[in-house]
Amino acid sequence: MTAPAARQTERQELAELRAVMDRQLAVLGRLAEAGLNLATHVERQATTPGAPLEARPDLALAYARVSRAVRLTVALQSKVIRDIQALSEAAHRHRAADDKKAARDHKDRITRVLDRVIAAEVDDEDEVDRLAEEACERLEHDDIYGDLQQYGAGEIIARVCRDLGLAPDWSRWAEEAWAKGEVRRGAAGSPFEMLNWTGPPAVQAAADPDPTDPQAASP
């Protein structure tokens, strides 16, 4: 099983376990409420004026048993609540780990593509190393480009290239998988944004002649 599939399975198991615990908590709540009502009824019987004295020992025993059951139920409720809180914290840690990995993967992808773009645009090897290092430093600082996760890889790559004084021919990169994905999604700000089209409007206009044009209407 791949790592993403394993994480998805684990998230599903956590969600299923949370659903079971929520049902358990609801059942315990009903039991506690029923036990409290029963204890109140027994107490009312024992304290009613004129209640037979011979019934008091039985009522006292019944009250003690019901009260103990209610206390145990409340204790179980508290345990389930603690377990739910622990489960929620675990789920939060998993989400945070997933978000951190996604951010790292996104940044790594941007860095790899930038390295290739810089190498293709610059002939001098020392200049390639300098620009690649500067690009990496820029990606490290949130105050330059903000949270990289908020932007597509293409938009960040284009902004870095512009800041480095590079003007790549993006059409030569359009066949790479990451670029095709941005074209399909129509990613805002992507340098491939203009590639997501089906053909020039003139083609459709030529296919549908203007009925008001005498030449177009003539056989």
Image: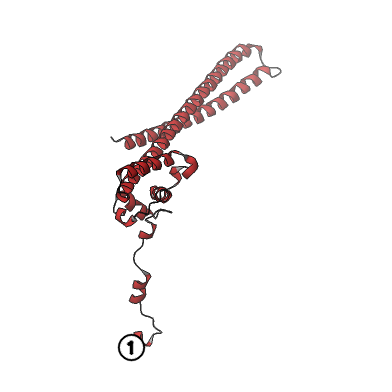
Left or right of residue 204, residue 43 in this image: right
Picture coordinates of residue 75 (x, y %)? 53, 20
Q: Would you place residue 173 above or below residue 35 in this image?
A: below
Viewer-nearest residue: 146 or 187 = 146
Picture coordinates of residue 4 (x, y %)? 33, 37
Viewer-nearest residue: 173 or 166 = 166
For the C terminus, give its image quadrant. bottom left
Circle count: 1
* Residue at image location 50% in from the left, 24% down from the top: 82
Say which quarter of the image contains residue 45: top right
Picture coordinates of residue 201 (x, y %)? 37, 70
Q: Residues within 10 Å of mark 1 (few under 14, many from 20)?
A: few
Viewer-nearest residue: 84 or 93 = 93
The figure's colour scheme reads secondary structure
Say which quarter of the image contains residue 192: bottom left
Q: Give SS at disc 1.
A: loop
Picture coordinates of residue 86 (x, y %)? 47, 26
* Residue at image location 36% in from the left, 52% down from the top: 182
Give the residue pinned by disc 1: 218
For the N terminus, give its image quadrant. top left
Q: Would you place residue 81 above or below residue 189 in this image?
A: above
Viewer-nearest residue: 177 or 78 = 177
Name the amino acid type tagged 1.
Answer: Ser
Name the outermost residue toward the right. Answer: 49
